[in-house]
Amino acid sequence: MINIENLTQQFSSGKGIFGVTINVEEGEVFGFLGPNGSGKSTTIRHLMGYMKPQHGRATIKGLDTWVNQSEARSHVGYLPGEMAFLDGMTGLSFLNMMAGMQETHNPSRRAELIRKLQFDPDIPIRKMSKGMKQKVGIVATFMHDPAIYILDEPTSGLDPLMQHVFIELVLEEKARGKTFLMSSHSFAEIERTCDRAAIIRDGKIVATKNIHELQTMQRKSFNVTLGDEVAVEALLSSALTTKRMDERTVRVDLQGNYDLLIQTLGSYHVKNISADDQSLEQIFMDYYDQEEAES
Amino acid sequence: MNLALYRHMMQLHLKIFLGFGIGSAVYVSLITSLFPLLDDNMAQIDDMMKMLPDGMMRALGMESISNYGQFISAEYYGLFYLLILGVFSVMVAIQLVARLVDRGSMAYLLSTRVSRTAVIVTQMLVLISGQLVIHVLTFAGGALAARFLIDTERIALTEFFQINAVGFCLFLAISGYSFLISCLFNDEKNAFAVAGGVTFLFYGMNMMGKIVTKIDWIRHFTPFSRYEPGKIASGEGDVLVSVVILGLIGLLSYGLAIFFFRKRNLPL
């Protein structure tokens, strides 16, 4: 459905994207991970026909996204990364304008989306909070029931509850056979929806993996608080990567080997386990470390 | 063009269009209603005007005030009108493209099946519609004031219409190159500075050429030289040639704007 072949665009600053290749199959949810400024948005701009590739090409349903940009866009629901609406419009008049341009009015679907995301579309956009604006954007993207969704950092600005609603929405559409390309700098968001993900860094794709591979690659840290000294000694002397934090607490770093932790702790009294959140940056670092170790 | 986009863009800008249009209409009708007061003493006023320096008179387009057209040219179309419409053309041309590109809103307009050509043609039509609204209201203001506020047969509506028509074409040219500049820049402020600067430069060159007769030729490089309301009023101006030349500059600029907007990379 979405094919990006060897796409290159170098800016005068020397930054850009270099030889990006991504294939997204029909019905697949594809995650596009990378730190800010790594080239996610630049790649997406090519898919929307905003930029002419210096090398390579991108197609949507076989349509070249530069040469046949409007035909290619007609299959797409696009959520831009920046929420920049027109001044002086209400949410509703913006949605009306977008519906007119999409040429598919589906008032019941729109009303359903507004109900799910719980916001008042009659407020002037200028007075809306960041989260509310993002909701208006999401409705505009989903309301014409496109076959393909291209979402640039879709959950930025949404509170955790609405992030959950949004993920539900993506899963519903996925169940209906829709295709997604979704960029993010949050691994958690990608983890819950995507089948596969590509990691981009400094404009180059460093890995394209299915989500389970990425999950096992991801290192997680747990702080385990134990009941007595015997248990602490047992954990420290196990094959796990451990570090004693204080008298009764040990930090354990895991990378896929969850069973070993469960077995080791099985016969002891555990007072508390808390997970350290791992940032995407950390995942990248782990990934690069691994690459270097292998080479 | 795209009708849904046109409708919403017109809604969004209607306040500005009506603001400038009604302001201009009220001013013209006020000045028009003053005309009979002057008309009675026309000979003396004309004599008095002759005492003022020639260069200054030419610069303000008040070579002579012996009929309504010349009067309204001197009082409005020679100076205020140019300032008001100049500000309007540059400002709205920048708002309709460069601002949307700079702020990223253009991403929404270009996220649907509507092509770049259709989007930019629609924005162009919004700008031209705005100018049409202002000119129609201004002409209506003058004509209605002449018909209902004052009691004189000396209001020459044909010449008054011609002044407005040539004025409309002048601002078609000015809004045209402003729109072209708006389509070329990523940064709203730069686009505004360049479009405003060029317009100011043209206006200044025209003024210089009028004041200093030795460098009269300098005026031919500005669209303002094809707009001489005083001469139209006294029947000396070649209205048709002006309309054609200014219209062509406008068409060419808008055409280039569409061409470049279709081809360029957009930082959205």
Image (cartoon, coloured by chain):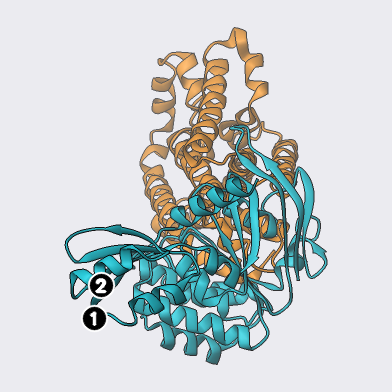
Chain colours: A cyan, B orange
Q: Position of residue B95 (x, y in %)?
A: 50, 49
Marks 1, 2: nearer the viewer:
2
Residue name at image x 41 percent, y 51 percent:
B29
Q: Which is more N-terminal, label 2 or label 1?
A: 2
For mark 2, give the secondary structure: helix
Label 2 is found on which chain of the structure? A
Q: How many labels does the image show?
A: 2
Q: Position of residue A129 (x, y in %)?
A: 32, 67
Residue name at image x 67 percent, y 76 percent:
A28
Q: Quadrant of the N terminus of chain B?
A: bottom right
Label 2 Cα neighbours within 10 Å, binned few <14 / some 14-19 / many ≥20 = some
Side (left or right) of B17 relative to A20: left
Query: CB atoms at circles 1 and 2 under 8 Å apart?
Result: yes
Label 1 is found on which chain of the structure? A
For mark 1, give the secondary structure: loop
Examine the rendering and report whether any part of residue A23 can be seen: yes
Circle 1 residue: A269
Q: Is B176 placed above or below A71 here?
A: above
Which of the 4 image quarters holds residue B230?
top right
Q: What's the amino acid at mark 1?
A: His
Q: What's the amino acid at mark 2?
A: Ala
Which of the 4 image quarters holds residue B171?
top right
Residue name at image x 54 percent, y 92 percent:
A108
Circle 2 residue: A231
